[in-house]
Image (tube, rainbow, N blue to C red):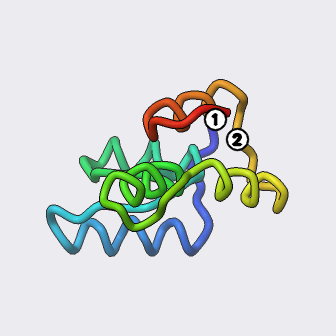
Amino acid sequence: MELELDLGESSAIALALENPNSLLIIDEKKGRKIAKAMGIDVTGTLGILIKAKSKGVIEKVKPILDKLESANFRISPSLRASVLKQAGEKD
C-alpha cells in the first residue's frame, strides 16, 4: 500500500496535529486513513452537508449531492443512500 500523500493533504494533517481537538475535513481515502491512524478526528464533504442540514444552515442535501455528482464528485449509490437517510431525505 502506498502511503504518499499530496502536499495539500500532508499540510492539512500537519495543521490538525498542531491543533489538538480539531476536525480535519478530508475526502481522499488514503489521507483519511492516515489521519485517523494518527488520532485525528476526520469528516468529509458529505459529513459537512449532513451537519449543515441538522444545524439549519441548508434546507436540503439532495440538490447539493446532485450538483457535486454533476461536477464529477464520486459518490457510490450506497453512500448516497446513507447520506440522504441520515439527512432525513429520500432519493
Q: Is residue 14 above or below residue 49?
A: below
- Where residue 82 sits: x, y (%)? 53, 29
The kind of residue on which mark 2 rests is Ile
- Where residue 6 sits: x, y (%)? 62, 66
**Front position in the image: 2 or 47:** 47
47 sits to left or right of 83: left
- Where residue 18 sits: x, y (%)? 22, 73
**Front position in the image: 67 or 28:** 67
Tag 1 secondary structure: helix
Instruction: Quote the CA–CA distance across marks 2 and 1.
Output: 6 Å
Residue at (48, 56) in percent of width and height: 49
Residue at (33, 41) in percent of width and height: 37
- Kindly indicate whether the residue at mark 1 contacts the one at mark 2 (C-beta within 8 angstroms): yes
- Where residue 22 sits: x, y (%)? 23, 65
Residues packed near mark 1 inside 10 Å, few (<14), some (14 to 19) or many (20 plus): some
Quadrant the C terminus occupies: top right
Q: Is residue 47 above or below residue 84?
A: below
Which residue in the structure is indicated by mark 1? 80
Residue furthest toward the left? 20
15 sits to left or right of 21: right
Which badge, 2 or 1, comes first in the chain's sequence? Answer: 2
Residues packed near mark 2 inside 10 Å, few (<14), some (14 to 19) or many (20 plus): some
Quadrant the N terminus occupies: top right
Q: Is residue 75 above or below residue 57?
A: above
Could you say which quadrant of the image residue 24 lies in? bottom left
46 sits to left or right of 79: left
Which residue in the structure is indicated by mark 2? 75
Give the total number of marks visible in the rendering: 2
The kind of residue on which mark 1 rests is Arg
Tag 2 secondary structure: loop
